[in-house]
Image: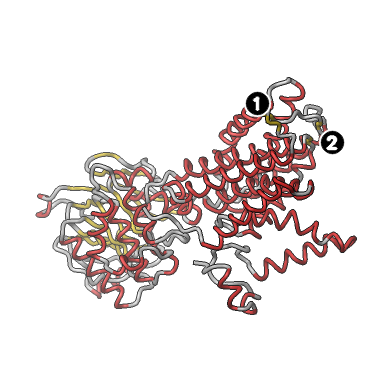
Amino acid sequence: MRSGGTGPASSFRALLQVDGVAVRYGGVRALEPTTFTVEEGSLTLILGPNGAGKTSLLKALAGAVVPRSGRVLLNGEDITRLPAFKRVRHGISLVPEGRGRLPTLSVRDNLILGWSSAPEKRRGAFQAELVRVFDLFPILRERMDQDCSTLSGGEMQMLAIARGLLARPIVLLLDEPSLGLAPMATARVYEVLAKLNAGGLAMVLVEQKAVPMPARRETTIVLHNGCVRFHEPRRPTTKELAALYLGERSAA
Amino acid sequence: MKQAKVRPIEIAVLLLIALICLAAALGGSRLAIYNLTIIALYATVVISLNILLGFAGQASFAQTTFMAIGGYGLAILATRYGINPWLAIAVALALSILLALVIGKPLLRLRGHYLSMGTVALALGTASFANASSFTNGGWGITGIPSLTIGDLSFRNPAAFLILAWSLCGLSLLAYHLLGNSHIGRAWRALSTRQDISATLGIDVGHYKLMALLIAAAMASLAGSFYVAFTRFVGPDLYDISVVINLMFMLFVGGLRSTVGPIVGASFIILVPQAVAGFERYQNLAFFALLLVVILVRPAGLFGRARGGGALERLMPGWLARLQGDPR
């Protein structure tokens, strides 16, 4: 297995180092020891079928589960044991699977929660930060005082991303942002994500399928049954992906 | 930042209640004053539940435990040790908060039905202890609790106590409203449905849940003390499991997360049984039938904010539905 962060791209600073992180739930192995590095401005794509361990990996990064073994370093600082609510202040923000709808909270409430989870020294005034978010997702301006349970799937995904961005992350984690979205909404979401990534925001993006999102520097990891089956600074071809998903060991 | 709206109908209801109380204080019958005072005190406990369950989503059935500490604390300290009743109320309040602190961490680790069962056990234990222990004088309870006074003003006068009880209720309502619109309220509402996502939004879930429990315990303790100061009697029946169920009825009939809901719910559960007293043997049956109708027509409560109406709501005339306010 190739270790991330070596090779020609290593002139870029490593933001997040994942070092042999393994996750278990009781006796069930969800993720075998996994190692990779997220560099500044890069896109790390985590692909794999259902039950491959993708969400477990993201949860270990966000602090929602404590890894069985291994370490997570952010800017060289060990955050493996840091609880989720503190981790966001260190710069790791998660856009959760299923978009993280919080009934009884308005769009504004959601955005305030995101904003207030940002470290004070990195965030601007709420109104100023809002302008940035409305620039990316103008529809949210019209929805400000609606309960977020009235939003469409696409709108809620945009809100979840906006909420995650307001936390001023160093690394943004995204768990299947296209899940259950109409093609139009998916395209819009990926357009914005590509723009943010091009602007220098490092991302770890989990998806089941190939992602229609260009990136200047990227790493792809394919998981299957909790094991890394592919780890390259490029995307697998359709043929490779099919072989990997069917569980065959790829020669790639 | 923008405040959550209190709907016009709710403001109207609050004004109406204030007028009724004023009229009763000036020249109401003894029964009217008694009923209104009891409503205010139960409503205060229901407001505390509206924080704990409505905002923070913690289905706790143990509010009677804190009412009992408030009630027995006042009774025992004032009658046995001759402590000034106001001070006794304050000591009982401190004890309630202390208990909430001690049991809060382990109890709030429980979720959903497990939290409910744990707190039901606590409520049952409270009533059994009060019934069995000589410290609480068992089933006989404690009488002769001194009246509250401020200077020359004695709250032995029911009209004066009516004002006192509604002051407590009003302050609790104000606290509920201010908390609900603060960052604390936002954090509570977030964690009430998704603890995992709340944590990734920087919310210390355990801390905020404990805060909700402490505030609710304080309100229930004060209401419990005032109840006993008003009736000047305390006994285990006041904290029976049926009281726990009535508190839940009050909350849901009034409407979860509604500002006036707790007062309307408490009024319904206290006044309707009296109103249907004419049914004699079938009084309880008539009461529960009415309760069932309310739940069918307004599953989110009379002033609830849930979307969509009940099975029977479609049969209601449009103006009545509009009067209840747009649910959103």
The extreme top residue here reads B81
Frontmost of labels 2 and 1 is 1
User: Toward the viewer: B179 or B158?
Assistant: B158
- Circle 2/circle 1 CB separation < 8 Å: no
Q: Which mark is residue B122?
A: none
Location of mark 1 (residue) = B151
Question: Residue B304, how many percent across, how many down?
Answer: 58, 62
**Mark 1: which amino acid?**
Gly
Which quarter of the rendered picture does the N terminus of chain A lie within? bottom left
User: Toward the viewer: B154 or B70?
Assistant: B154
Q: Do discs 2 and 1 belong to a common subunit?
A: yes
Chain identifier of the residue bearing label 1 in the image: B
Identify the secondary structure beneath mark 1.
Answer: loop
Location of mark 2 (residue) = B139
Which quarter of the rendered picture does the C terminus of chain A lie within? bottom left
Question: Residue B165, how many percent across, how many down?
Answer: 66, 42
Query: What residue is rendered at 66% in x and 60% in y?
Result: B253
Can residue A118 be spotted in the picture?
yes
The correct choice, above or below, for B117 with respect to B219 in the image is below
Query: What residue is rendered at 76% in x and 44% in y?
Result: B240
Question: Would residue B191 appear left or right of B138 to someone viewing this image?
Answer: left
Question: Residue B91, how many percent across, how many down?
Answer: 63, 27
* Chosen colour scheme: secondary structure
**Mark 2: which amino acid?**
Gly
